């Protein structure tokens, strides 16, 4: 049996949000790959999962994976590259051994499902459906081994196929994690919504590279990796706003993510259309950043006389003049 304690009541009630019928005590979500399987930062004095509305667990595949060769991480100006390679012990081990050790009274826990085929996505989702996990995030940025390695998330039809397969495997809320490495993220969101997605997380990392000029080789062992951190925030904000236009009339929530490192950053994402704000890379620099962001959001609510953080979602007021498509 998984451990259960009373849900945290320490956070300001104005921070509570409804996310796919689940109550999050704050709008902050710890992102997949940044907190292991939910216990990585609990060793840090002063850190508490209770400061987050939800924690996304590490990406999980059907069978165990060792991940990519070193180097896997490289710090860049205003960000970092990573190519971990979905190192994980496999779905059965996560469900049977790891989930029972989590305290589901601290916060909500979200599984992250990955795969190399549509069938693998289905099987991993099915295993999490029979578990205490609160929701399931689908990482559609994985390469499709049956289609020459093209990432599922970069093709609208393949994205929808993955979501539809996962939908058949569970009644739990499905959150589709959208890639920015595609032509039309709004069209992809629309297709995934029609296939059964209950929510979106926007955005996943941007692909990038760093070069060792002395050896003239890529620093990352996988040659390329995902860029995260403040460097990608302007791109992420625009993508969140574009996806929000698709979701708004359907009541579909969005977890906005990409370079959030302060309360002001989180507020920008909420105003642009996010229901929740994802925190990832910032944790590596400041493991105790969550209460600071929560406090900053409360200060903003006080200054603007708002009763709940949800009032900020999609409150962006665009300028009336229409900008050229090129953004010039």
Image (cartoon, rainbow, N blue to C red):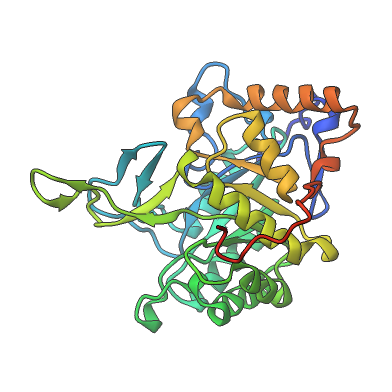
Q: Foreground: 11 or 322?
A: 322
x and y, in percent, of residue 42 in the image = 53, 27
Q: Foreground: 241 or 10?
A: 241
User: How many numbered badges does the structure rendering display?
Assistant: 0
Say which residue appears at 13% left-offset and 45% top-offset: 213
Q: Residue furthest left?
A: 215
x and y, in percent, of residue 268 in the image = 68, 40
Say which residue appears at 74% left-offset and 66% top-offset: 246
Say which residue appears at 74% left-offset and 31% top-offset: 5
x and y, in percent, of residue 260 in the image = 57, 37
Name the image quarter holding the N terminus. top right
Q: Is 316 positioned to the left or the right of 285 in the image? A: right
Q: Is 269 positioned to the left or the right of 233 in the image? A: right
Q: Foreground: 268 or 162?
A: 268
Q: Can residue 174 be spotted in the picture?
A: no
x and y, in percent, of residue 121 in the image = 53, 70
Q: Foreground: 299 or 37?
A: 299
Q: Is 161 positioned to the left or the right of 230 in the image? A: right
Q: Quadrant of residue 296?
A: top right
Residue 138 higher or lower than 196, as above or below:
above
Q: Can residue 140 be spotted in the picture?
A: yes
Say which residue appears at 74% left-offset and 51% top-offset: 273
Q: Quadrant of residue 238?
A: bottom right
Name the image quarter holding the C terminus. bottom right
């Amino acid at each position: 049996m998984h451990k259960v304690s009373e849900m945290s009541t320490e956070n300001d009630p104005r921070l509570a949000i409804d996310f796919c019928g689940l109550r999050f005590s704050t709008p902050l979500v710890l992102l997949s790959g940044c907190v292991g399987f939910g216990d990585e930062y609990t060793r840090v004095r002063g850190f508490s999962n209770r400061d987050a509305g939800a924690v996304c667990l590490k990406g999980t595949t059907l069978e165990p994976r060792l991940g990519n060769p070193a180097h896997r991480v490289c710090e860049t100006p205003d960000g970092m590259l990573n190519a971990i390679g979905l190192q994980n012990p496999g779905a059965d081990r996560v469900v049977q051994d790891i989930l029972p050790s989590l305290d589901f009274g601290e916060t909500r826990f979200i599984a992250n499902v990955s795969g190399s085929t549509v069938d693998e996505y289905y099987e991993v989702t099915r295993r999490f459906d029979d578990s205490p996990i609160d929701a399931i995030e689908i990482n559609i940025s994985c390469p499709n081994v049956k289609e020459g390695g093209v990432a599922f998330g970069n093709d609208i039809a393949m994205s929808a196929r993955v979501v539809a397969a996962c939908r058949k495997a569970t009644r739990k809320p499905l959150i589709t994690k959208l890639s920015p490495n595609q032509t039309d993220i709004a069209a992809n969101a629309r297709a995934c919504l029609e296939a059964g997605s209950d929510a979106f997380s926007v955005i996943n990392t941007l692909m990038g590279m760093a070069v060792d000029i002395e050896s003239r080789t890529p620093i990352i062992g996988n040659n390329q990796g995902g860029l995260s951190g403040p460097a990608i925030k302007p791109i992420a904000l625009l993508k969140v706003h574009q996806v929000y236009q698709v979701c708004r009339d359907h009541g579909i929530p969005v977890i906005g993510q990409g370079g959030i490192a302060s309360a002001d950053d989180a507020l920008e994402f909420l105003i642009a259309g996010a229901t929740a704000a994802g925190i990832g890379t910032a944790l590596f620099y400041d493991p105790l950043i969550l209460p600071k962001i929560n406090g900053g959001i409360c200060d903003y609510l006080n200054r603007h006389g708002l009763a709940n953080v949800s009032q900020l979602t999609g409150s962006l007021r665009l300028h009336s003049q229409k900008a050229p498509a090129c953004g010039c």
